[in-house]
Amino acid sequence: GQNIDQPTEMTATEGAIVQINCTYQTSGFNGLFWYQQHAGEAPTFLSYNVLDGLEEKGRFSSFLSRSKGYSYLLLKELQMKDSASYLCAVKESNYQLIWGAGTKLIIKP
Amino acid sequence: IAGITQAPTSQILAAGRRMTLRCTQDMRHNAMYWYRQDLGLGLRLIHYSNTAGTTGKGEVPDGYSVSRANTDDFPLTLASAVPSQTSVYFCASSDSGEVNEQFFGPGTRLTVL
């Protein structure tokens, strides 16, 4: 079956680093996305990985291991505005996305 | 302003009523999607369209229909609303590039009583 697992909620401190994990089992794989969603708003694109390794974009980095069915999103120098849900999504062979339920990240001062 | 618009922003609807959620994009994207988002669940695909004139069923299509008469518009219709269709509905679009990330509209919060 198809399944994407992420922790439901995480808490971190302002200025610190946090890693949000995502494991997946899907019928096909054509890439993995991370999106950010603030409460009451639409998801917005953060990163895309299709090859194994680390993609860095400012304070955010995303890692992929296709053989392990595993990805993580790394957020550095956390700011209060990073409080949001982070959604992991896998692009399947038919190019449609399968979404995880999201990880709610709470940043404390 | 480039992007996706959805209307209405929110709606309370009596069960059994017909309702159309509107979605318009001005990015000339070929593909468009309708999702519903419920607490504790991931976004679930209702219907999609890879190009104007074609549509397809997603994971949860029952009770919903769509049309794609042109590139810009992708309305979602609930023929006879039921309380289980209470949700937040997001429309999205994507281009045909290698990444083809999806861009989302602001959402419609629908309550069916």
Image: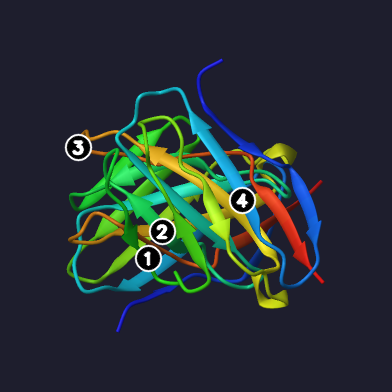
Q: Residues within 10 Å of mark 4 (few under 14, many from 20)?
A: some
Mark 3 residue element: loop
Total numbered labels placed on residues in the image = 4
Q: Which residue is mark 1?
A: B58
Q: Amino acid at mark 1?
A: Gly
Q: Which residue is mark 3?
A: B98
- Compare marks 1 and 3 and give the one earlier in the sequence: 1
Question: CA gap, disc 3 to disc 4?
Answer: 32 Å
Q: Which residue is mark 4?
A: B20
Mark 4 residue element: strand
The residue mark sitting in front, 3 or 4, is: 4
Left or right of B44, for residue B106: right
- Compare marks 1 and 4 and give the one earlier in the sequence: 4
Q: Residue at x 67, y 64 (%)?
A: B87
Q: Amino acid at mark 3?
A: Glu
Residue toward you, B17 or A6: B17
Residue toward you, B27 or B55: B55
Label 4 chain ID: B
Q: Amino acid at mark 4?
A: Thr
- Position of the N terminus of chain A, as image quadrant, is bottom left
- Compare marks 2 and 3 and give the one earlier in the sequence: 2
Answer above or below: position of B99 versus B90.
above
Question: CA gap, disc 1 to disc 3?
Answer: 22 Å
